[in-house]
Image (spheres, helix red, strand yellow):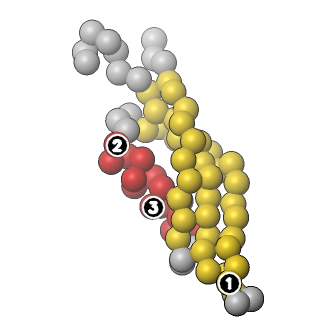
């Protein structure tokens, strides 16, 4: 049996939504073990001087908890 936990994070990029997702996943996997999936909850852009200045994503990361006996 496995038990998973879901945590919500946000990440931003000056390049694209895809880059923001990549950065968020990269950062999450640096801290969390057993990451299995991510769900993009929201996408947002920031605008400055009539131009897009940043792409932001809010995502839910699912990771499997380790067995207490193994920890």
Residue at 25% across, 15% down: 70
Give coordinates of residue 33: x percent, y percent.
Answer: 35, 35
- Pointer 2 local density, CA inside 10 Å: few below 14, some 14–19, many at least 20: few
Residue 48: image tag: 1
Residue 8 appears in the picture as rendered: yes
**Callout 3 environment at 10 Å: few (<14), some (14 to 19), or many (20+)?**
some
Residue drawn at 46 percent across, 33 percent down: 63
Residue ID for mark 2: 31
Q: Is residue 14 left or right of residue 48?
A: left
Going by the image, does 10 lie left or right of 52? left
Q: Which mark is residue 23?
A: 3
Which structural element holds mark 1?
Answer: strand
Q: Is residue 65 above or below residue 63?
A: above
Tag count: 3
Is residue 39 depicted above or below 65 in this figure? below
Above or below, 10 against 17 in this view is: above
Locate residue 44, reporting x and y percent. Answer: 70, 64
Instruction: Report the side of 7 relative to 41 (left or right).
Output: left
Q: In the rendered structure, which disc, 2 or 3, sits on the residue that comes first in sequence?
A: 3
The quadrant where residue 54 appears: bottom right
How far apart are the alpha carbons under marks 2 and 3? 13 Å
Residue 52's spot in the image, x, y percent?
67, 81
The secondary element bearing badge 3 is classed as helix
Q: In which quadrant is the N terminus drawn? A: top left
Residue closest to the eye, 33 or 7 = 7
Dot placed on the residue nearer the N-terminal end, 3 or 1: 3
Within 10 Å of the Cα at label 1, are there few (<14), some (14-19), or many (20+) other Cα atoms? Answer: few
Q: Position of residue 12 (x, y in %)?
A: 54, 65
Q: Nearer the viewer, residue 55 or 33?
A: 55
Considering every residue shown, the one lying at the far right of the view is 50
Q: Residue at x 34, y 15 (%)?
A: 67
């Amino acid at each position: 049996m496995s038990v998973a936990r879901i945590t919500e994070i946000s990440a931003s990029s000056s390049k694209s939504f895809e880059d923001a997702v990549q950065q968020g996943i990269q950062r999450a996997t640096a801290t969390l073990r057993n990451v299995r999936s991510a769900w993009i909850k929201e996408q947002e852009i920031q605008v400055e001087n009539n131009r897009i200045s940043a792409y932001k994503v809010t995502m839910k990361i699912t990771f499997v908890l380790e067995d207490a006996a193994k920890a």
